Image (cartoon, helix red, strand yellow):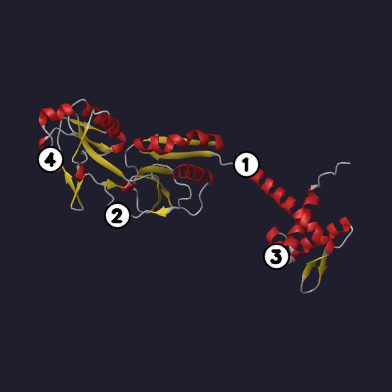
Amino acid sequence: MKPSLPSAGEFNQLRAFVAVAGSLSFSRAAENLGVSSSALSQMVRGFEEQVGVSLFNRTTRSVTLTEAGARLFERVQPAVEELADALGEMREHRALPAGTVRVHCFRAAADLYLTPILRDFNEAYPQVVLDVTLDDAVVDIVAEGYDLAIRLGEVIDKDFIAVKLGPDLRQTAVASPDYLARLGTPAHPRDLVAHQCIRWRWPGQKTPYKWEFMENGKWFEVAIDGPLISNTKDLAVQAAVDGVGIAFASQQLIAPHLAEGRLVALLENWSAPFPGYYLCYPAQRQMAPLLRAVIDTIRGDQRKGTQDIRLYGQELGFALRR
């Protein structure tokens, strides 16, 4: 005859027995199970009556297993722990995070760090909605109601938690072979003032970004001019390919054009790396499970085991330039 599964009460008695047998202390076992010592003692006594044998030798100073108790403990401990783990997993599954997480992400970072995790995240957390805004504007994350952001390291607030997602970036001046044949090649960044440069403006800013280069370990800016201003780097790079002028963009955008010969890299000796993309969010005592799910998924896809770091601009070797 096939033995029946233990009832809920019998399983609780088994857990009580295993807890006491494992610690040989009623007080410690009661604390681990979250019950009173008297209630635990009563459960163990009832279990002994049910099996018809004494399982513990009790004195005022110690608790030891009887021979029967030791044999039973050896057999049931793995099964009880396995059942407890299985029930715990079911509770966790039943309590999967649910709700909406608002994410602000720089456009170029989305393809690298956000798009690759969307399918897996949806399958793992079907009740979480990701409300994603792709925008290069440096917005106030908290004031605008976002839960987290993916942005460049140099524009992260100092009191945020930030995790580096990838390598440092590097911007390079580029132009088409046709442009260089017509108007020449600049030998130094300051020569750019005599060229047609395709300017870029941070979204939300009124004035175009001044191109930044490094010389003798120090950053310096060049106030360039030219026939086109754009708020997207994609348009600037395409204009450079079409011979409109010289553009200034990251390797991610220009690499395919360099490989195919549509663009030529310029002034590389003055193009230094700068902090790349970070996942950042406000420091908080208690993090909502759905927010933690998003953060862990993005981090896990990039750098498994990475620890949170608090980001302080100058301490990481760069200035917070807006």
Would you name the residue on which mark 1 appears? 93
Would you name the residue on which mark 2 appears? 317
- The structure residue drawn at horizontal position 50% and vertical position 46%, both measured from the top left corner, is 292
Q: What element carries label 2?
A: loop
Disc tally is 4
- The structure residue drawn at horizontal position 54% and vertical position 46%, both measured from the top left corner, is 289
Would you name the residue on which mark 3 appears? 28
Circle 4: is it few (<14), some (14-19), or many (20+) Cα within 10 Å? few
Quarter placement of the N terminus: top right
* Residue 125 in view here: no
Judged left or right of residue 299, residue 153 is left
The image position of residue 119, as x and y in percent, is: 50, 33
> Alpha carbon of mark 1 to alpha carbon of mark 4: how far?
62 Å
- The structure residue drawn at horizontal position 84% and vertical position 44%, both measured from the top left corner, is 4
Would you name the residue on which mark 4 appears? 187
Say which of 76 and 295 sits in front.
Answer: 76
Judged left or right of residue 3, residue 123 is left
Say which of 172 and 50 sits in front.
Answer: 172
- Identity, as a three-letter code, of the amino acid under mark 4: Ala
Q: Nearest to the eye among marks 4 and 3: give it.
A: 4
> Alpha carbon of mark 2 to alpha carbon of mark 4: how far?
28 Å
